[in-house]
Image (cartoon, rainbow, N blue to C red):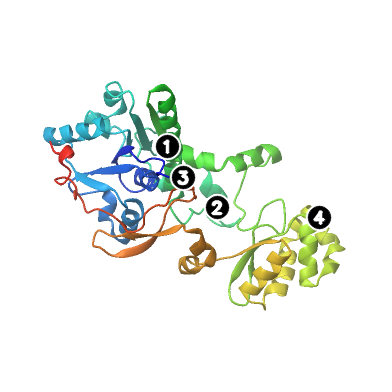
Amino acid sequence: MANPLAGIRVVEFGHYIAAPAATQLLADLGAEVVKVESPTGDQARGIGAYGEGIVLAFNRGKRSVALDLTRDDDKRVALRLIAEADVVVQNLRAGTMARHGLGAGDLVPDHPRLVYVSVSGFSSKGPSASRAGLDIAAQAESGLMSINGEQDGDPLRVGFPIADVAASYAVVQGVLAALLRRERTGQGGVIEVSLLDAMIHMQSAMWGEWHASGQEPRRKGNGQATVAPAADLIHTADGTIVLSAYTPDHFARLCELMGKTWMLEDPRFADNPARVAHRDVLLAEISEAFGTARTDECLAALADRGIVAAAVRTYREVAAASDTRSSGILTTGVSPDGERYPIPSLPFSLDGVDPAPDRAVPKVGADTDTLPRYEP
């Protein structure tokens, strides 16, 4: 079976994560992606190891064309690329594409089948449309940082650029929906995705909880506010696990496993409100039961009883884990210097789709002169 996006051409005007990550997913689904970079390259190429990681993660198998959009000849090359494209994805600073005559309003009237995607920090319809909006701004202003961290501590960001990644998923959803509509109607469309909107959407369950409880979400640290034990951290002899056993049957199984069935009769642990009120004592009892056993022993015993538990793993441990290795989530990329490295691929499986390993990240402008149809 052919990859579902085979024959689809995507032109990316992207920096950092949100746009390049989206087009990487489209490439893994079979699309041809041409990355239009400035002569100095995607800005991520110049910010050290973190930027190098971004480039390695989100530019595999793409072609790079280096263009200076302030030059008329280079702009004509960009227009020719777009004329041959099915999809354009851009996340340049607000107004940049329009200043070069490459905005949606400039292109879509002449290319009605084109799917044109703009990614920004904030909605183009609001007062912050022109603000610089990186991942941290969306984490802060979406409410995420207000609920992330210890109850009495400072707000914390999530430890990876979650807003950028969330926006990239939203882009892919929008592109696939627009391409399907185009198949039915012949018309493309204009898609706008903001990091702020993507982060607000990711927290939909918290908005629902706010309505249901009447309590605005707040930082809680580990553990859930209304049930226990739930997402609680337990130290083992050689590591750390998280554990949830808050339904009556699961809590009973946990008490039986620990040899502490007396807890079922103790009013401090009789139901979820009581266990939440006495969470510290509850966790002390659980920690005492598991603290002298190895992590793998704890997980096996809990799994045998249908109790949700998981090991807290480092990246090295994740890469070596059997579940990771068997799922096929990790593929092999090739850096611009020819070095191979492990990197996540598609976050789902689809029969007939097998993202090819050993796809190289191009050097800046590697394909400017080698693809005749892209020459001015």
Position above or below: 57 against 143: below
Left or right position of 376 against 211 = left
Q: Which residue is mark 2?
A: 148
> Would you place residue 164 above or below residue 245 in this image?
above
Local SS, label 3: helix
Give the mark nearer the N terminus: 4 vs 3.
Answer: 3
Percent position (x, y) of residue 215? 67, 42
Asked where in the image residue 185 lies, by quadrant, the reply is top left
- Farthest right residue? 265
Q: What residue did someone put label 1 on? A: 194
Looking at this view, is 247 or 347 the one in front?
Answer: 347
Q: Residue at x 76, y 65 (%)?
A: 254
Q: Disc 1 or 4, which lies upstream in sequence?
A: 1
Report the front residue among 263 and 191.
191
Disc 2 residue type?
Answer: Asn
Q: How far apart, in angstroms, are the residues tagged by discs 2 and 3?
A: 17 Å
Q: CA distance from mark 2 to mark 4?
A: 26 Å
Classed neighbour count for the residue bearing mark 3: other residues with Cα under 10 Å, few (<14), some (14–19), many (≥20)? many
Tell me the element at label 1. Answer: strand
Which label's residue is closer to the chain start, 2 or 4? Answer: 2
Q: Which residue is mark 3?
A: 166
List x then y, in percent, for residue 212: 70, 38
Amino acid of disc 3:
Ala
Pointer 3 or 1: first along the chain: 3
Q: In what element is the residue under mark 2?
A: loop
